[in-house]
Image (cartoon, rainbow, N blue to C red):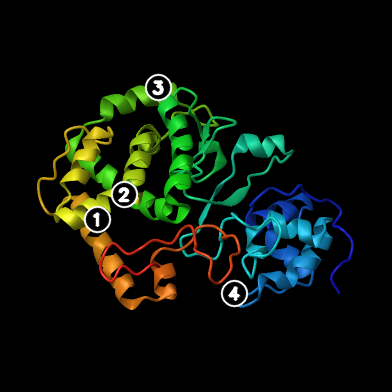
């Protein structure tokens, strides 16, 4: 039988921590290799083992209540979690596109944790506004997190990103954001020479070890405001309606300059990344509207977080009408 009492040393829980990260910390605190912890608790973990089967023995070993551990680690919330208290809005760890990143090192230190912590997170959590650290794309460990106190536009972009989610819906901003990032940095390589700016930024930015960030990470942080603005433009519906009515994307192209995403932008050929994205976007919507299947819809536009429960006849705030005939609401 697994032990019904805590291990000699327990560790503090951290919000949205991954199960593997928690196991590493608990094992290290008890001077055990991580691979030996679960066998010690008589827990056999395989790919087919439901994670909830070892919630109670792990909670006992960690010295916490099962419900408390369940709320701390999103992996325990994914199965039928809609009606569970505290589950709404948490990252869905079962998505193939689910994001794991190092937690803000200053937040973990404030929680009394000295070991690295990896968390499930969402696409919009790129800046810790409390500690003004970059915690988003381009990081592999907490020491690489950069103090961006001097990048005021990047700090404002974090708030702008949240506002876009409130305006357009998380599902749609999340769907547009990675494409916006890819499009923008393709443009940057083709139409701009940012290296003077890059050198200047690297002189004023440092990570947790006192070193300047890598060139790629510096570009990601410096141009994050433009990427967020582009994501908001692509996530909106106005350009869709205008393109369907007019048969072209002139308004969308104009807005790239108007909103200071890329000044003087004019697509020179059909292979332009924005034009290719528009074609793929409309093709996907036509395919989904034709099949009218919620499963296909969720496959193309997955929810990033656990949604609130709703009645069968209640409209979902994140569903949209198809921009094409037969105007199916999905």
Q: Which of marks 1 and 4 is nearer the N terminus?
A: 4
- Numbered mark located on residue 203 in the image: 3
Q: Nearer the viewer, mark 3 or mark 2?
A: 2
Disc 4 versus disc 3: distance between alpha carbons? 46 Å
Disc 1 versus disc 4: distance between alpha carbons? 36 Å
- Measuring from the top left, give residue 246's x and y in whole percent: 15, 53
- Rendered-image quadrant of the C terminus: bottom left
Front residue of 201/229: it is 229
Residue shown at 24% from the left, 39% from the top: 256
- Numbered mark located on residue 277 in the image: 1
Name the residue beneath numbered marker 4. 47
Asked whether the residues under the numbered discs 2 and 1 touch, taking CB atoms below 8 Å apart as contact, a structural biologist would say yes
- Measuring from the top left, give residue 20's x and y in whole percent: 64, 59
Residue shown at 44% from the left, 68% from the top: 298
Work out whether 195 lies above or below 265.
Answer: above
Name the residue beneath numbered marker 2. 234
- Measuring from the top left, give residue 86's x and y in whole percent: 69, 55
Q: What element carries label 3?
A: helix
Q: Earlier in the sequence, mark 3 or mark 2?
A: 3
Count of marks, rendered view: 4
Q: Which of marks 4 and 2 is in front?
A: 2
Q: Nearer the viewer, mark 1 or mark 4?
A: 1
Q: Earlier in the sequence, mark 4 or mark 3?
A: 4
- Measuring from the top left, give residue 139's x and y in whole percent: 48, 43
């Amino acid at each position: 039988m697994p032990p019904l009492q805590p291990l000699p040393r327990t560790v503090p829980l951290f919000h949205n921590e991954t199960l593997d990260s928690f196991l590493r910390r608990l094992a290290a605190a008890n001077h055990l290799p991580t691979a030996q912890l679960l066998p010690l608790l008589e827990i056999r973990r395989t790919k087919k083992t439901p994670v909830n089967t070892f919630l109670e023995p792990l909670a006992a070993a960690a010295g916490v209540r099962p419900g408390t551990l369940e709320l701390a680690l999103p992996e325990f919330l994914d199965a039928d979690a809609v009606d569970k208290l505290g589950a709404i809005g948490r990252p869905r760890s079962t998505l193939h596109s689910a994001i794991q990143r190092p937690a803000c090192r200053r937040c973990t230190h404030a929680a009394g944790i000295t070991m690295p912590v990896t968390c499930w997170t969402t696409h919009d959590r790129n800046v810790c506004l409390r500690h003004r650290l970059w915690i988003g794309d381009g990081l592999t460990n907490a020491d690489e997190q950069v103090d961006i106190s001097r990048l005021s536009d990047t700090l404002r972009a974090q708030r702008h990103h949240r506002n876009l989610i409130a305006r357009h819906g998380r599902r749609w901003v999340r769907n547009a954001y990675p494409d916006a990032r890819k499009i923008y940095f393709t443009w940057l390589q083709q139409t701009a020479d940012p290296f003077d700016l890059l050198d200047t930024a690297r002189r004023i930015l440092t990570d947790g070890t006192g070193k300047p960030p890598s060139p790629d990470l510096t570009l990601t942080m410096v141009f994050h405001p433009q990427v967020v603005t582009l994501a908001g433009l692509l996530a909106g519906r106005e350009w869709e309606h205008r393109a369907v009515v007019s048969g072209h994307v002139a308004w969308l192209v104009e807005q790239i300059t108007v909103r200071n995403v890329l000044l003087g932008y004019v697509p020179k050929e059909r292979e332009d990344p924005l034009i290719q994205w528009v074609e793929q976007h409309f093709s996907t919507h036509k395919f989904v509207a034709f099949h009218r299947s919620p499963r296909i819809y969720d496959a193309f536009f997955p929810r990033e977080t656990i949604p609130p429960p709703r009645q069968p006849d209640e409209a979902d705030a994140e569903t949209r009408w198809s921009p094409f005939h037969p105007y199916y609401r999905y």
